[in-house]
Image (tube, coloured by chain):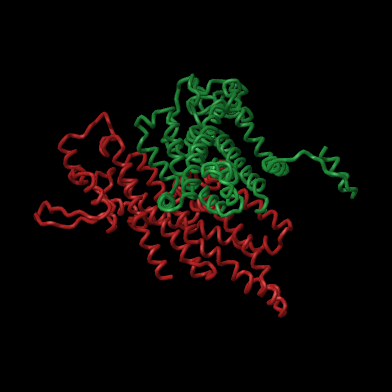
Chain colours: A red, B green
């Protein structure tokens, strides 16, 4: 088991390396430099050179890549001493192109100002809320559907989950926005994010809907399977009350698969929320991503791609490990 | 013919059942026809396909024709006090912010969604089948390489990768070909062929062990013939199901790309076959959401109807092609 964990964690390295390589390649294959966003007003040559110096764009490509992902040794312009410039591996995602290097990608994403949380904070909160929303509604719905299998409760739960799973956030988000914000006027199209509750409701529901459906389905099938196990029959045979059997024996075992997929679910919710963030104007990472596309801010795009991939890989790793720990029947090589 | 025999059987009279033999595909089709949701979806898809093909005949106006002082007209059943924006039967679904007929835009937009749903999936399936067959059958290093590669692709959030690609190459030759459609096709194919290859590989690995392959080998059938005559047809069912499920995400992918301004390049050329897409209508509706929410609603309903239909069809196909799963 330990060997397996180590191997899986080590596999992280080449995956992230390749992700970095691919995004780096795309960014550098792109015609046009990062600063000629306005073709009518090209930057003065001196400014351009200074910026290139600052971003290390005068270096050969391979060295830029190593510098971006790992580290580079460079001379401090003031003292003249060699010093190490850490790259993504040391948590430095480089300066953003859009700010002309005044702000680093990681500060832009992870540093809040005063009372307002960081961009990552917004996305993380939205993802967490969506997960909690999905769990709170999905687990009971799935359990009830399974315990009352083939009744109207079950059919309704199944219908809801089938529909919710197949509706993309693009559809559900706009639908909720038009109905509740434009027609009913319960929410604002341009929300005030100082309000701690109201602006979060619609994006949370939008983002959580498909996860809710997924959890309902998963819980239902899991409960159905556990219900037929011998130990449940034994529990009933020894005269345990229905409620006690359902909670102590059925639910406790049936919940395991749901628990194990929570890691990747949360990772998926945080990284997959960008369209939801866009529709409801949540000032999170997804919105940053969209803005940086418009600005062609490649350092931001690369940084986000790396970070998102990191979260997703971590989520997938967690699920594999969790399966092994929780269910010893699944053998890990 | 079939009904009469089944009646006699039910009447417990043993008569010889002489119905025409049905192929596996015929069986699947019969099962699919019994699935009402799938059948309804098939009709919706056929409807949109017909609309896409006959768009020039169906569209009441040119989708690119702008008329002044005619922007943001409401659909015909909504009446306002302002004669310039009140609903009129000349523009059944109203107009967008620069006075183009929304209905005609939606009709032409169905072309893009249909094409974007089908073309990349075709490439995905082709590449996925070839790579999956070879990797699954040959095994070894090639197989390993494929699996490692899929791991990397899995690490990317799909949509993010597509958007990054579409943004990066937007101004290049690729981004300009076919109003930007080629780049959308490429981006969608690149991200989705690996999971298809993985699926085919899994099928091949399990089929390889089956007795009928062993017997085919024993009588001396050549390897390519085994691959294409015996393994591929048996692996095709799951591939078709997976492809059907992949279509909605491709359609939504295009809509999102266009919505973000890095997808289809809407054109004003009246002779263009793909002048606009649902994503473009969506964008216009979103920008003017307070003035004319209906534009947004129409686009959402179109995209929703088509994608949900493909999902339900996929569900039906899965049950029809593999009845063991039910």
Between A74 and B242, the one lying in front of the other is B242
- Can residue A181 be seen here? The reply is no
Identify whether A23 is placed above or below B114. below
- Answer left or right for B189 relative to A221: left
- The N terminus of chain B - image quarter: top right
At x 41%, y 57%, the residue is: A313
Residue at far bottom of view = A238
At x 15%, y 53%, the residue is: A74
- Can residue A88 be seen here? The reply is yes
Identify whether A131 is placed above or below A304. below
At x 34%, y 53%, the residue is: A109
Q: x, y percentage for residue A251?
A: 61, 69
Q: x, y percentage for residue A280?
A: 47, 46
Q: x, y percentage for residue A95?
A: 26, 49
Between B56 and A188, the one lying in front of the other is B56
Between A126 and B268, the one lying in front of the other is B268
Identify whether B33 is placed above or below B269. below
Between B131 and A74, the one lying in front of the other is B131
Q: How many marks?
A: 0
Residue at far front of view = B219
Q: x, y percentage for residue A125?
A: 44, 57
- Answer left or right for B300 relative to A90: right
At x 47%, y 56%, the residue is: A127
């Amino acid at each position: 088991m330990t060997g397996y964990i180590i191997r899986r964690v080590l596999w992280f390295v080449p995956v992230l390396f390749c992700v970095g390589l691919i995004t780096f390649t795309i960014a550098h294959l792109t015609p046009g430099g990062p600063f000629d966003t306005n073709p009518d007003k090209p930057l003065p040559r001196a400014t351009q050179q200074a910026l290139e110096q600052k971003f290390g764009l005068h270096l050969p490509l391979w060295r830029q890549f190593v510098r971006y992902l790992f580290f580079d040794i460079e001379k401090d312009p003031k003292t003249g001493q060699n010093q190490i410039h850490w790259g993504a591996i040391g948590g430095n995602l480089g300066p953003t192109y859009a700010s002309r290097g005044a702000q680093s990608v990681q500060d832009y994403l992870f540093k809040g100002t005063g009372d307002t949380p960081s961009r990552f904070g917004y996305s993380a909160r939205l993802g967490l809320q969506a997960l909690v929303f999905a769990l709170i509604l999905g687990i009971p719905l799935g359990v009830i559907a399974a315990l009352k299998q083939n009744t109207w409760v079950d059919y309704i739960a199944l219908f809801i989950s089938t529909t919710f799973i197949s509706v993309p956030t693009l559809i559900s988000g706009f639908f909720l926005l038009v109905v509740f914000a434009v027609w009913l006027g319960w929410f604002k199209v341009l929300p005030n994010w100082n309000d701690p509750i109201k602006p979060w409701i619609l994006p949370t529901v939008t983002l959580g809907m498909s996860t809710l459906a997924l959890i309902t389905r998963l819980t239902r099938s899991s409960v159905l399977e556990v219900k037929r196990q011998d130990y449940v029959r034994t529990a009933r045979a020894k005269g345990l009350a229905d409620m006690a059997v359902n909670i102590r024996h059925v639910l406790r075992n049936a919940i395991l698969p749901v628990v194990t997929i929570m890691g990747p679910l949360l990772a998926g919710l945080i990284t997959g929320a960008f369209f939801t963030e866009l529709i409801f104007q949540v000032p999170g990472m997804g919105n940053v991503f969209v803005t940086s596309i418009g600005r062609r801010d490649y350092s931001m795009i690369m940084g986000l791609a790396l970070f998102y991939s990191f979260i997703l890989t971590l989520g997938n790793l967690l699920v594999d490990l969790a399966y092994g720990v929780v269910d010893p029947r699944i053998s890990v090589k | 013919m079939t009904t009469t025999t089944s009646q006699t059987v039910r009447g417990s009279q043993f008569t010889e059942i002489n119905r025409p033999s049905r192929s596996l595909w015929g069986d699947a089709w019969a099962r699919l026809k019994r699935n009402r949701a799938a059948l309804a979806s098939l009709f919706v898809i056929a409807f949109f396909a017909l609309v896409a093909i006959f768009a020039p005949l169906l569209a009441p106006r040119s989708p690119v024709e702008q008329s002044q002082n005619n922007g943001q007209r409401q659909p015909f059943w909504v009446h306002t006090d302002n004669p310039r924006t009140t609903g009129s039967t000349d523009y059944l679904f109203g107009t967008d912010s620069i006075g183009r007929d929304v209905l005609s835009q939606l009709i032409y937009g169905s072309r893009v969604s249909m094409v974007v749903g089908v073309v990349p999936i075709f490439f995905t399936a082709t590449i996925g089948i070839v790579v999956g067959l070879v990797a699954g059958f040959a095994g070894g290093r090639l197989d390993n390489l494929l699996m490692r590669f899929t791991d990397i692709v899995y690490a990317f959030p799909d949509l993010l990768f597509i958007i990054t690609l579409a943004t990066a190459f937007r101004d290049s030759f690729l981004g300009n070909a076919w109003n930007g459609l080629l780049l959308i096709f490429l981006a969608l194919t690149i991200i989705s062929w690996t999971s298809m290859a993985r699926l085919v590989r899994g099928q091949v690995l399990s089929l390889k062990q089956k007795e009928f392959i062993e017997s085919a080998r024993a009588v001396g059938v050549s390897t390519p013939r085994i691959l294409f005559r015996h393994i591929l047809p048996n692996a095709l069912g799951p591939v078709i199901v997976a492809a059907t499920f992949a279509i909605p995400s491709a359609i939504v992918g295009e809509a999102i790309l266009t919505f973000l301004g890095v997808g289809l390049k809407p054109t004003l050329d009246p002779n263009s076959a793909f002048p606009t897409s649902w994503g473009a209508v969506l964008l216009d509706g979103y920008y003017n959401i307070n003035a004319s929410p209906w534009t947004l609603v129409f686009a959402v309903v179109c995209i929703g109807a088509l994608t949900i239909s493909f999902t339900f069809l996929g569900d039906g196909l899965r049950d029809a092609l593999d009845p063991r799963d039910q």
